[in-house]
Image (tube, grey):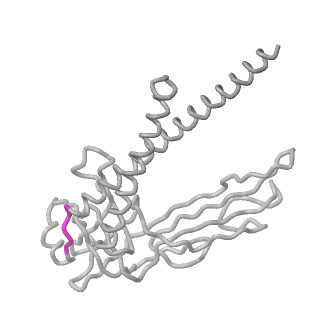
Amino acid sequence: MEHSILYQLFRYFADSADKTVIITGSVSLILGSVLAVYYHRARALLDEMWAVDTYTSRELRRMCSGDFHATVEVQGKVSCDAPLTSPAANIECCWHHTRVDRQKRNSKGETSWEKVFEQTRSTVFKVNDGTGYTLVDPEKAEIDSVKVCNRTSVLAEPWFEGNLFFGGGLYRIYEEAFLPGGYVYVLGQASPVQQGASPDVVIHYPDKGYTEPDHRIFLVSRKPEKLLTSEQGISLSVCFWLAILAFGLAGYCTLSLSGILP
């Protein structure tokens, strides 16, 4: 009887150890895979920033004529002739993303959040660099936006769907936006566009000359290129070594379970 109890205790701790090793290995493998994907994307962005030249508005107008398209960088000050008005913060912007979640309660009294409204809108803005301006269409861009609204409300507001008397609970309102004014750095595809009587150049999401969607990069940032490349370089180094450690730990757990390692 005593031997049976000891054996059961031994099997319990052995099984627990195996479960711990399996969980640790699985989590490490998933983490390593996520880091590897992030590293690949960050590497592609950094390579693109190093390879692409920065042009002035005057140079782009000379270069992008006819049906010519090119991946370029521009930088300058943001202005917008026809800005949007964000619904939650009620401020002028070139781009905004707005989301509203409603709190609901089930029969057990447990609360959760459900999305009742979500909207992303953008409008063309100008990048002025002293030689003229270049148009930018920020749709589908990775945008360096700012948080302009983060609040809760007990009433449904007129601009989004929802009603306090049908469901009840709180509303959580979140909004981020890209505002006119200030410095901007843009990396994207430049193409000619006809605006009235005179031709212009617009930078937009790359849609020509790319066979792989993952290689299409469209970035709108408030940070200068030098700072962005420095931050990307640091992120790449950290991501690389963390991925190596994660895959190494996953490999160790696999060998341990197979009995090759103690």
Residue 14: where, in percent of width, then height?
Answer: 64, 26
Please tell me in which quadrant of the rendered image residue 168 appears. Answer: bottom right
- The answer to whether residue 64 is magenta is no
Q: Relative to residue 197, is residue 255 depicted above or below?
A: above
In front of the other: 252 or 225: 252
In front of the other: 83 or 248: 248
Residue at 66% over, 30% down: 16
**Is residue 153 rendered to the left or right of residue 38?**
right
Residue at 17% over, 73% down: 61
In front of the other: 251 or 57: 251
- The answer to whether residue 54 is magenta is yes
Please tell me in which quadrant of the rendered image residue 199 appears. Answer: bottom left
Q: Relative to residue 5, is residue 132 depicted above or below?
A: below
Q: Quadrant of the N terminus?
A: top right
Residue at 20% over, 77% down: 56
Q: Relative to residue 252, is residue 124 depicted above or below?
A: below
Residue 255: where, in percent of width, then height?
Answer: 46, 28
Residue at 68% over, 22% down: 11
Residue 6: where, in percent of width, then height?
Answer: 75, 21
Residue 34: where, in percent of width, then height?
Answer: 45, 45
For this orientation, the residue located farthest to the front is 2
- Range covered by the magenta-colored residues: 51-55
In front of the other: 25 or 151: 25
